[in-house]
Amino acid sequence: MKKVLAILLFVMCHVSIALSAVSDLTWYQVCMGQMPVDWYGSAEAQEIADIVIAVQKNNGGWMKNDQLHKLSSADYQRLVNDKDGRSCLDNVATTQEMRYLARVWKATGNDIYRQAFLRGLQMIQTAQKGSGGWSQYLPLSNDNGYQDYITFNDDLMVNIMKLLRDISQNQGDFANITDAATRTWCQTAFDRALQCILDCQINIDGTYAAWCAQHDTVAPYLPTEGRPQELPSISGYESANLLTFLMSIEDPSDELKSRITAAVNWLDAHKIPNRAVEDYTNAAGQKDRRIIEKNGTHLWGRFIQIGGNTGTQVYNKFFDKLKNRGKTRSYTYNGVKYTYTEEELARANYDPSKAYEPVFAIYKDSIPHMFYRFIYNYEDTPIAFDNKGCPYYTSLFPGVRMGYQYMGSWCQRVIEVEYPAWEAKYAGHDGGTYVLSPETCVSKNGDKTYTFSNAFTITNDGSWGYTVAKKIYMKLAADITYTIHIPDDLQVTEATIRGYANYDDADASITMWNNVSYPDDTYFFPRTGADGKNIIVSHTIDHSDRPVTGELPFKIKGKQLCIAITLTCTQRTSGLESNQQSATGVQKVMRNGQILILRDGIEYTILGSQF
């Protein structure tokens, strides 16, 4: 054993000298394939893989947050000495090491890397719960703590399920790394995990909402607490990531489709509109965060308080759990020591009337009497005194606002970009919303035609090449006419254009839309702000009175405009216009599902007004 350790230490020292480009990356980036493909077959990559195997836990996994490609001697020895310790699935631990080993095995064919990979897979198999979910560690803590719950936090379950899906498909780095029976098990484990996600989706008095970061391990899989600042709630952050993953599943069942739609609708209904979080320096010279008005940008709480009978059940269970745990927290103020039970702290400020609002809590060892205490104010509000005469915070304060993302726009891209594209893919042309953006663009035919996954196309008369801004916006030029080509079976009833002017020295506007000219200040996109940040603006154009079919042209003034276009459509009732001429020479015209009267070349509604 000493000889093996000596060899590995020697290898590790040489790796630290040899590392060049690889040392510029994080361990996660190296594991996820951001080095050149042929590098994974190099001597350098194999030396790192040998270290990965040397620190692999005896139960098959790895610990989190270690940069295995550039370990110090002390850290290497620490990990070797802890091989009997727990394996971790949090923060991409174990799944990333398995991906690295698969890449090196594929490049070298050396079976030692495949065997280490399979031991990791065995650990994942052992760790899967009867519910289909996973917790952070194996073995469990068994202390009734959050680390043993079903965990969506930090994409834990999503990372495992992506790996299982990749293995079961027997492609790429995972081609033939396992036998057929193991691939079948991976698919079965994936299906069980998917059912677990659906089982955990929070049902508020008959309406499906979204998810918490952690859930109980037994039915009804209620949302539960994490660390002392992570209260039972609906999580805007974790729910957004779960939805992105769920929408990546091919051929979703009707149940999955309905659950995705329910979660998107719930989150959309509970956004805080036209607000954003801004980092700034406050009057005391501290780095701080505040909520500002920002047109077209919306916020969600990382933790959103649950309401209804479901909320009552969730929070009563939470309070009872803290009571049964029996822990106390003490705080000294003006020489007096105040002692609280955790249940007492949690109940002290819980307000059922704040249902569906963001809820906050503070986890700071210097003020333990704030653990699990419900707070409803993001920005500074006065300190209050509790029933013992001890002061407590009624809001977050700069240090904790900067140390944790309590508010964010995590759900916005899911709702406005990803979901409409997914809906169009699986719903067909039955109406609904259709997004034209880099997310849905599937081909660029030369410089003039952009084709989208929902059968829409855009052409232009200026040979403007399709380019991308911020991954979700089309970068379009001024003084060019763009034309949206609408599928024959659809008609546009509403259009939303969201984006920003791409230059800090020029505003932009849409000055022509559907062959109607508009003043510069109607559909206006202001130039980049003085802080260098783009100002995101959203404009909605109503076509419900006269739906648009066939082609929808538009034109931009200024410089470049970066936009995504969301079109709300209905199905055309006739598909084509139809005319019916009476004996008197007056024509009845069916246009976009509406009966019109054509007399002397002028169209009238059936009530006699001019159309």
Image (cartoon, grey):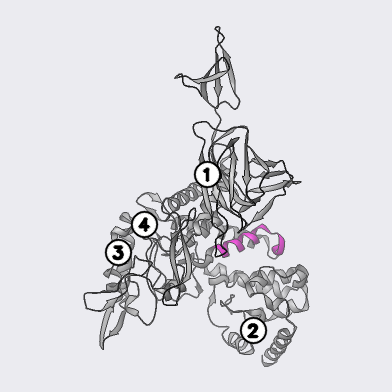
Q: Are marks 4 and 3 in contact (CB under 8 Å)?
A: no
Relative horizontal placement of residue 269, taking residue 344 as reference (left or right): right
The extreme top residue here reads: 583
Quarter where residue 471 is shown: bottom right
Residue 315: quadrant of the picture: bottom left
Q: What residue is shown with label 1? A: 522
Select label 4 or label 1 by which is in front: 1
- Residue under circle 3? 316
Q: Which residue is mark 2?
A: 71
Q: Position of residue 509 (x, y in %)?
A: 58, 47
Given residues 18 and 500, the one toward you in this image is 500
Nearest to N terminus: mark 4 or mark 2: 2
Magenta span covers which residues?
A: 158-174
Seen at 73% across and 43% down, the residue is: 462
Q: Amino acid at mark 2?
A: Leu
| Residue in the foreground of this view, choosing between 596 and 425 | 596
Of marks 3 and 1, the one in the foreground:
1
> Mark 1 or mark 4, which is nearer the start of the sequence?
4
C-beta proximity under 8 Å, tags 1 and 2: no
Give the mark nearest the N terminus, 1 or 2: 2
Tell me: 561 left or right of 205. Answer: right
Q: Nearer the viewer, mark 2 or mark 3?
A: 2
